[in-house]
Amino acid sequence: MKLLATVFAFALVCLASQDPSHPKPPEGAKPLPQIPDVPMTAIERKDLWQRFTAPSPIAGTYRLRSAARDNQVVREGVRGYLMVGERYLSIQIHDETRGSGKPSIQASVREYTLVGSRLRTTSCLGVRVPPGDSPVLDGDALVEVRTIEVTTTTLRVLQGPGDYLEFERID
């Protein structure tokens, strides 16, 4: 009896799940013609100006966590940000630790290429203000090459023996 009730319930569920919005073709109707299978061909698109490349592994927004000069870590008095896009980066640093009572400021936009752990930057627009001095514009197309160390949360830019800037990723 249980078996008969189970089979009956299963048949009702199957009949109820049929979709009445897709009726069967009328009796005696001819089948629709076969749609030809056209192979895909490559189309040259000269109108697409962008290239679809892998994103930069260092792209993001960073805040300066620490700096080191002559193997001495400086955590207070130095503030800065680094914004890295796919081809350009922007860096702003405000340093009050030089001892003259006046801050040192650096702000620049640079085009960059990354090859392994070497970061090559070319200045697009930049200014440096040494402590108590007049602003100095970066030379047009000033090129700098730095070694960087990247982890999932930090980016360290080595500036020389015992000197570095360490940024933490904030976005």
Image (tube, rainbow, N blue to C red):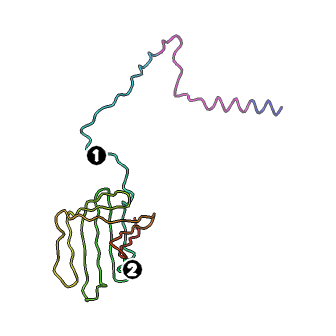
What residue occupies the far front of the structure in this picture? 161
Label located before the other in sequence (1 or 2): 1
The reply to whether the magenta stretch includes residue 48 is no
Query: For the residue carrying disc 1, how many other residues have a C-alpha within 10 Å: few (<14), some (14-19), or many (20+)?
Result: few
- Residue at image point 35% right, 65% down: 147
Quadrant of the frame with the N terminus: top right
What residue occupies the far right of the structure in this picture? 1
Q: What amino acid does circle 1 point to?
A: Gln
- Residue at image point 48% right, 12% down: 30
Q: Is residue 54 left or right of residue 14?
A: left
Q: Which residue is mark 1?
A: 50
Query: For the residue carrying disc 2, how many other residues have a C-alpha within 10 Å: few (<14), some (14-19), or many (20+)?
Result: few
Please state the extent of the stretch shown in magenta in the rendering. Answer: 8-31
Gap between marks 1 and 2 measured at Cα: 43 Å
Q: Is residue 152 left or right of residue 78?
A: right
- Describe the element under mark 2 as helix, strand or loop: loop
Q: Position of residue 6 (x, y in %)?
A: 76, 33
Query: Which disc number belongs to residue 71?
Result: 2
